[in-house]
Amino acid sequence: TYTIPDAGASASFVMTEGAQTVNGNKTLGGSIIRASQEYQLSAPAKVGATAGWVVQPASNLYEATLPQSQTGSTLVVPVRGLKVGWTVTAFKVEAQVESAGNTVTVDADLRKLTNAAGDPTDASVGAIVQVSVTADTKVEAAKTGLAEVIAADEWLYVLITATTGATTDIRYLGCTVTVTEA
């Protein structure tokens, strides 16, 4: 129980975790900041400019696959659900590689489209250094240290570029974007 004896006086107190209930409408003078909120990208991916990826193949799994012997094949994953003013601090790509001893490479680039009078501009926000493996691998490649503040006229997407050797393939499972909500 907190008692403030004089309604005209200024008083400050701190509430700690617990079962407090605050009733009625409240106005906050500052922002509520939630750091390190990780969002899974659930929007469907699409094949990019360089074909090769198979999106939503006939299976009970929701994934995209890249079969053997593909070179520089691109997959586009839209980033949806972010709010203007949030700051993107990281992103991650989750995939599984069957390599059979041959080389598989995966690059991922978080990109932003900005609306402009001429044409929209397309720029990199941050890229994951190429993952190159020659063994079956659970890929959890991440790019951290970003500080991209979402503006009203910007949209993000992840561009994945991959190459598979003979008897190799990639199963793309998803991406996550880590943000600070403010």
Image (cartoon, rainbow, N blue to C red):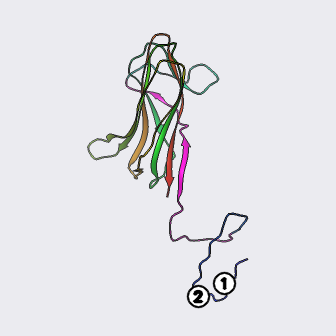
Q: Secondary structure at mark 1?
A: loop
Assign a secondary structure to mark 2: loop
Q: Quadrant of residue 76?
A: top left
Q: Residue at x 29, y 41 (%)?
A: 119
Of residues 133 and 70, the one nearer the viewer is 133
Q: Residue 1 versus residue 48: which sits nearer the camera?
A: 1
Assess whether residue 36 is covered by the magenta stretch: yes
Residue at the extreme top of the image, as rendered: 166
In x, y percent, where is residue 12? Answer: 59, 78
- The amino acid sitting under disc 2 is Ala
> Farthest residue toward the left?
118
User: Where residue 60 sits: x, y (%)?
Assistant: 64, 23
Residue at the spot of label 2:
9
**Within-10-Å neighbours for mark 2: few <14, some 14–19, many 20+:** few
Q: Residue 32 appears at what percent x and percent y?
A: 54, 62
Q: What is the magenta range? A: 22-49
Q: Which residue is mark 1?
A: 4
**Hey, what amino acid is under mark 1?**
Ile
Of the two numbered discs 2 and 1 on the same chain, state the one appearing first in sequence. Answer: 1
Q: Residue at x 73, y 64 (%)?
A: 19
- Which residue lies at the image location 62% right of the left edge and 25% below the top edge? 61
Q: Are marks 2 and 1 in contact (CB under 8 Å)?
A: yes
Does residue 116 appear left or right of residue 150 in this picture?
left
Depicted 97 relative to depicted 119: above or below: above
On screen, residue 17 above or below 52: below
